[in-house]
Amino acid sequence: MLLSAPWAFGASPEDDKGLDVAHLESMLAKGAYAILAVEAPLDAVTPERECELVAAAGILRWDSPKFAHRATIWGVFVEPVHRGAGLGRAVVTAAIDLARTWPGVDYIDLGVSERAREARRLYESLGFHAWGREPEATEMGGFRYDEIHMTLRLRVAAPSVARSEDA
């Protein structure tokens, strides 16, 4: 994913913590961190591996008590040859469904590159709406791309939660 769509991710192969197995294992050991994936069987040409990863989405719940009512979807990717088969929808929907099981999570946030028009359409079809645009958030190869910030409200916060205008 980092090589196929480098403009869509903040990390590069040289600095992606997700490529560090020990770091990944420690993150996944937390209760509110998950990677949802779709695998496809490989042919007999690669007997050392039975499957390949073709779609994935990560989700995490913020640790800070001030932000524990929010989750973030990250790292959504579908291998180009498998696009159009609903796999992106499947992994993002699975992430949303998981967040719904986390008590107190009322919102899911994500960011999407302005270049990822299909991804943005997918997120909008699932109920996410854009709330802001970060100009020139990512720079690659002499080009800069805006990041569109989106959110999905899962449930209405309890009435006892004071709003900023009440404080």
Image: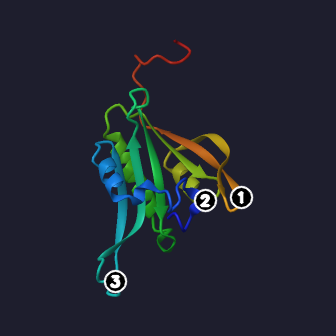
Do tag 3 and tag 1 residues touch (Cβ < 8 Å)? no
Relative placement, left or right, of 41 versus 132 is left
Q: Does the rendering let one see residue 56?
A: yes
Q: Secondary structure at mark 3?
A: loop
Do tag 2 and tag 1 residues touch (Cβ < 8 Å)? yes
Q: Residue at x 35, y 68 (%)?
A: 39
Relative placement, left or right, of 164 versus 147 is left
Q: Does the rendering let one see residue 90?
A: no
Inspect the image, locate mark 3, and give the three-letter code of the amino acid beneath it.
Thr
Q: Which mark is residue 157?
A: none
Q: Position of residue 106 (x, y in %)?
A: 41, 33
Disc 2 target residue: 7
Q: Position of residue 96 (x, y in %)?
A: 40, 46
Q: Residue at x 40, y 31 (%)?
A: 64
Q: Residue at x 40, y 47 (%)?
A: 59
Q: Secondary structure at mark 2?
A: helix
Mark 2 vs mark 3, CA separation in Å? 30 Å
Disc 1 target residue: 143
Inspect the image, locate mark 2, and give the three-letter code of the amino acid beneath it.
Trp
Q: Position of residue 48 (x, y in %)?
A: 29, 80
Which of the pair 49/109 is nearer the observer?
A: 49
Q: Residue furthest right?
A: 142
Q: Secondary structure at mark 1?
A: strand
Disc 3 target residue: 46
Tell me which numbered mark, 2 or 1, is placed earlier along the sequence: 2
The figure's colour scheme reads: rainbow
Q: Residue furthest front?
A: 14
Inspect the image, locate mark 1, and give the three-letter code of the amino acid beneath it.
Phe
Asked where in the image residue 36 lies, by quadrant, the reply is: bottom left
Q: Residues within 10 Å of mark 2 (few under 14, many from 20)?
A: many
